[in-house]
Image: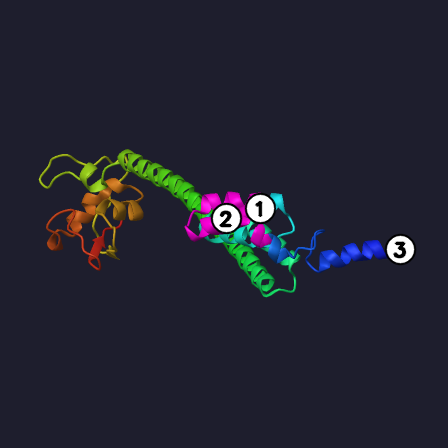
Amino acid sequence: MRYIFIPLCVVSLLLSGCNKDGDSIEKQEEENTFLQQGKSYMENSDYENAEIAFKQAIEDNPVMPTPYFDLATIYQQYKPDAIKAIFYYTHFAEMLPESERAKFAKEQASAIQKKIQQKILELAGVNRIKHERDRLKLENKELYKMIAKLRKDVKAAKESQPTNPLTSTAPAIGSSTQPTTSGSTKPVASGKSLIYTVVAGDTLSKISKKYYGNSSYWDVIYDANRSQMKSASDLRVGQSLVIPKK
């Protein structure tokens, strides 16, 4: 029984908060110079020295719970360091699991962890936004290039197009220049002429090409309709034109 009693006694002393000299944890904390210095620094808002003093107190006597709690407070409120705050709050709660301050320490550690998680989510959201912004910038840049190329192609196409048939093939009124017939017979007005209704975009050259297969016969249509046309370009949508048959 003597060999069993000794270790049980040691365990009993540890659980009762006493050291080998019989002093309680509370008394050890009251007499610990480093811990008391740390509290004095805290009262004077000297958190740098308070941090140093509390760490020295832990090195001097690791079983004192108070310096762990005080360090957690410093890292939570005055020298923000979430990881250290969680560590010291958790360690304090493990040392005094049934105390009211242990409950508070656990709550604070949990709150800090939630803030870290929220911050991570926010950063992830910011990163997604930045990624999307960069993607859109790149797409816009490519779009601007495509638009610039399209404008260039349109301009080149316009410059390469032939001039308006009316201005290129139709001679001015009174001009002696005759359209080229390429040896074919020119249409002549007769009693069997057709009637054509002008639509948007029509020119005499286009109408001539449609009915005669040759845009150079525009003047035949013009001569047949001089009574209602002031010039070869005097066309109106819905206007009825006489188309002489060949």
Q: Nearer the viewer, residue 42 or 115?
A: 42
Q: Is residue 240 above or below residue 156?
A: below
Point out which mark residue 2 bears: 3
Q: Is residue 197 above or below residue 48?
A: below
- Label 1 environment density (alpha carbons within 10 Å; few <14, some 14–19, many ≥20): many
> Image quarter for residue 176?
top left
Q: Nearer the viewer, residue 15 or 161?
A: 15
Q: What range is drawn magenta here? A: 29-57
Magenta part, dominant SS = helix
- Judging from the image, what secondary structure is the residue with disc 3 in? helix
Which numbered disc, 3 or 2, marks the residue closer to the eye? 3
> Image quarter for residue 99?
bottom right
Residue 50 shown left or right of residue 163 in the figure: right
Q: Residue tagged by mark 1?
A: 57
- The N terminus is located in which quarter? bottom right
Q: Earlier in the sequence, mark 3 or mark 1?
A: 3
Q: Residue furthest right?
A: 1
Residue 65 shown left or right of residue 82 in the figure: right
> Image quarter for residue 4?
bottom right
Q: Earlier in the sequence, mark 1 or mark 2?
A: 2
